Amino acid sequence: MPDLSTSGADLVAALDIGGTKTTAALVSAGGAVVGRLTAPTPGRSGAAAVLDTAAGLVEKLRADAPGAVRALGVGSAGVIDSGSGLVLSATDVLTGWTGTDLRGDLRRRLGVPVTVVNDVHAHALGEARHGVAAGYDTVLYVAVGTGVGASFVLGDSVLAGAHSAAGHAGHQPSPYAGSLPCTCGGRGHLEAIAAGPALAAEYVRRTGRPVADLRAVAALAEDGDETAREVVRLGGAAVGSAVGGLINVLDPAAVVVGGGVTGLGGPWWRALRDAVPAETLPGLAGVPVLASTLGPDAPLLGAASLAWKVS
């Protein structure tokens, strides 16, 4: 059990519910994470099992909390209606997740006010309130990992869209993707060339040699494999081109880029930052493009920031 002795004031709880793991935390009003527990997400066992796991983590933290836990903020995988707390759609990684009443079910289990938001939106709020973009009023966050997602932060809230689906940046056309098939069923989308699995697949297409995953491509690039290096630069350029276009549409004060693919390092980042100004309008070329700094704390802090609003 984590040591919670560093805080004597009231707290809120936060949940980050993903396809593979669920993390709960207690967070102070100043954004300090004072307790944390993680468990595998039982995604194949149905929504009730996922909710039992999530609520159980919060209960364990609350049992040792030095102050009252006033509310719960949740960042969850899937398309989330933040107004109702319903999961509108989700991939089959979380069996039966679509239609789940996240807010109502967790409120009944834990007896505190609950706010719910998509996990990428939660990550964006965390970076905008407590991370590298703190102090900027409008922030575009782009996450590049197994997929590609985005969120636009305006003050203390995020742009959810009329159908709660805003932020699917991976499903915009990309000139780098050609006619490659996308996970959504379309073709030529950014995710089909820039996401982690897509970059590994691109290396296989170019060489005919199988690789386990993107980490293997990264290792080959570090060892001097020129094709692997080209693939890494391609991924960065594709994301940078898309970010430049999004800057033109949204005019953010700052952009934050995070997710596992950013771990490809300097060559990927240089390709991204070179591609951004090639797409932006002249007056927007100076918008800073920043690397995410909070890591796994970001969605917890973002979800907690919403919980404080209803506590």
Image (tube, helix red, strand yellow):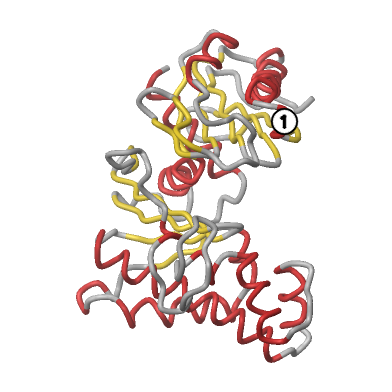
Task: Please state the horizontal and vertical placement of residue 262, each as a whole percent of the image.
Answer: 58, 66
Quick check: 44 above or below 102? below
The residue at 48%/61% (across/down) is 257
- Could you tell me which quadrant the C terminus lies in? top left
* In the displayed structure image, the side of residue 239 where residue 68 appears, left or right: right
Quick check: 239 above or below 6? below
How many numbered marks have been drawn onto this rendered protein structure? Answer: 1
The residue at 65%/85% (across/down) is 229
State the image quarter where residue 210 is shown: bottom right
Quick check: 79 above or below 169? above
Task: Please state the horizontal and vertical placement of residue 100, each as a whole percent of the image.
Answer: 52, 24
Task: Please state the horizontal and vertical placement of residue 117, each as a whole percent of the image.
Answer: 45, 34
Task: Please state the horizontal and vertical placement of residue 84, each as a whole percent of the image.
Answer: 38, 22
Front-lying residue, 199 or 259: 199
State the image quarter where residue 297 is shown: top right
* Three-letter code for the amino acid on which mark 1 is drawn: Leu
Front-lying residue, 98 or 282: 98
Q: Secondary structure at mark 1?
A: strand
Q: Residues within 10 Å of mark 1 (few under 14, many from 20)?
A: some
Quick check: 223 above or below 186? below
Front-lying residue, 215 or 156: 215
Can you identify the residue that label 1 sits on? Answer: 37
The residue at 42%/30% (across/down) is 306
* In the displayed structure image, the side of residue 102 where residue 260 appears, left or right: right
